[in-house]
């Protein structure tokens, strides 16, 4: 069963390789979606794929890469239209900072 989940990660998550780490983790699991920094200092991501694999990736995001200090992860349902933010021909994209 497929799942689309959107998450916002708060804490010390910018300037520590968090987006690159998420991209690597998502690609290794064949997850579709994107990740981007937000101006408020958080990181936002959208994951689409098998529900159990998406859940596993979100659990990993609660820890993050070694230099990150994750304080909170907010999770909600994502919408298929959000996948259109990806770069054409990419299954998973690192996007520009958003508000």
Image (cartoon, rainbow, N blue to C red):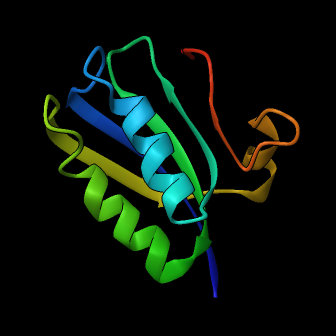
- Judge left or right: residue 5 versus residue 8: right
Residue at (57% x, 17% y) in the render: 98
Residue 20 location in percent, x, y?
43, 32
Residue 41 location in percent, x, y?
32, 16
In the displayed structure, would residue 16 be above or below residue 27?
above
Residue at (77% x, 58% y) in the render: 80
* Quarter of the view holding residue 56: bottom left
Residue at (22% x, 39% y) in the render: 65
Most extreme residue toward the bottom is 1
* Quarter of the view holding residue 27: bottom right
Quarter of the rendering occupied by the N terminus:
bottom right
- Judge left or right: residue 27 versus residue 44: right
Residue 38 location in percent, x, y?
45, 19
Q: Say which of 14 and 42 sits in front.
A: 14
In the displayed structure, would residue 39 be above or below residue 34?
above
Q: Say which of 21 and 82 sits in front.
A: 21
- Judge left or right: residue 95 versus residue 53: right
Quarter of the rendering occupied by the C terminus:
top right
Residue at (37% x, 39% y) in the render: 21
Residue 48 location in percent, x, y?
63, 63
- Judge left or right: residue 82 versus residue 16: right
* Quarter of the view holding residue 50: bottom right
Image mark count: 0
């Amino acid at each position: 069963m497929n799942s689309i989940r959107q998450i916002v990660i708060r804490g010390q998550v910018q300037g520590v390789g968090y987006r690159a780490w998420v991209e690597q983790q998502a690609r290794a699991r064949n997850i579709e979606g994107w990740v981007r920094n937000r101006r408020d200092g958080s990181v936002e991501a959208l994951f689409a794929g098998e529900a159990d694999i998406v859940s596993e990736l979100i659990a990993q995001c609660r820890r993050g890469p070694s230099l990150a200090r994750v304080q909170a992860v907010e999770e909600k349902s994502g919408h298929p239209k959000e996948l259109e933010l990806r770069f054409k021909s990419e299954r998973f994209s690192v996007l520009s900072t958003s508000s």
